Image (cartoon, rainbow, N blue to C red):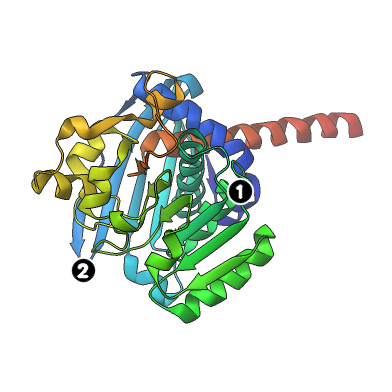
Amino acid sequence: MRIIDAEYVHHRLTFAECIPAMREAMAAFSAGKTKQHLRSILDLGDGAVMGVMPGALGFAGVFGTKIVSAYPGNFALGKPSHQGVIVLFDSETGEPMLVIEAGSVTAIRTASASAAATDALALPDASRLALLGYGEQAWTHAHAICEVRKLEDVQVWGRSFERASAFAERLSGSIGIPVRPTDSARDAVESADIICTVTAAKEPVLEGRWVKAGAHVNAVGSSFAGPSEIDNELVRRSRFIADSREGVISQGAEFLYAKAAGLVDDQHIAGEIGEVFAGKVVGRRSPNEITVYKSLGHIVQDLAASALLMRKIESNETAARRDERKAV
């Protein structure tokens, strides 16, 4: 059994590889080719939660679980908000194969899934990105979306303009395009083609009346019933796509608030993103339609990303043995 740390994950799990892996995993999930339980969430108080997510990815020959804590207050302490482990087992023997630091995998696979959704739902010429939030997920989302759209401009908003400015400068140097901080969420999103909400906000930071026709929104920051990043009006106006219909109906805060207000019902969920990837559900229907991808995160995404890492480890070990034989 191997233990994989965050540094290894960040150096080996690329967006170019992970984005298609998310498409495959979510299409398999929506087609009923995976096994999983709805995540179990334990409220620890003060916004902190613990989650347990078991599942099996038959086409990759693995099963496992993610055990993770989410502490939104960690950002102010300079620590990751999501911490935990993914334990990966061999489906033929039941042997535990990998224990992987979960925060790094979560950051990369979440952004990769959003990028895959953006590729399917955003307009082909979308070039202006707005990031609401300036944490790790904002960083990974910007890099992942650069893989699927040619961005020309990025705006960043957060509660601290000083931190947003520092983040914007660092991100611009990394992705090589202008990144501008703003002290107004509305200013950040009004001209945006793609919007990512990646905050720890408890109340909506994005209002539907600010979002222009034809925009695509990745609603990412809230992963359980409670915190809500987007308002009821945006849910109502949008073609609303879930990562998991069951998950969103049970734990998708923004959808649940709009439903409780009588603005939508369960039929408002147009489909799952895996159904869109498989061509079974139409994603965007017109250039003027607003699309929303509601991301709760899913164990099949973690397993698919972990399987990528496992194959890389096995490939490296095979190459090392081959080199040893040649040396002899």
Q: Residue 123, percent across and down?
A: 51, 39
Q: Is residue 32 left or right of residue 150?
A: left
The quarter of the displayed image where residue 273 is located: top left
Q: Residue 73, percent across and down?
A: 33, 71
Q: Residue 135, percent across and down?
A: 46, 65
Q: Residue at x 41, y 39 (%)?
A: 288
Circle 2 residues within 10 Å: few <14, some 14–19, many ≥20: few
Q: Is residue 305 left or right of residue 327?
A: left
Is any atom of residue 195 visible in this view? Answer: yes
* Residue 146 marker: 1
Is any atom of residue 40 visible in this view? Answer: no
Farthest residue toward the bottom? 162
In the rendered structure, which amino acid carries the disc numbered 2? Asp
Residue matched to label 2: 46
Q: Residue at x 43, y 20 (%)?
A: 58
Circle 1 residues within 10 Å: few <14, some 14–19, many ≥20: some
Please determine whether, in this image, residue 118 is positioned above or below residue 173.
above
Q: Indicate which disc, 1 or 2, sits on the residue closer to the N terminus.
A: 2
In the rendered structure, which amino acid carries the disc numbered 1? Cys
Farthest residue toward the right? 327
Q: Nearer the viewer, residue 107 or 3?
A: 107
At numbered mark 1, what does the secondary structure look like: helix, strand or loop? loop
Please determine whether, in this image, residue 99 is positioned above or below residue 45.
above
The quarter of the displayed image where residue 203 is located: bottom left
At numbered mark 2, what does the secondary structure look like: helix, strand or loop? loop
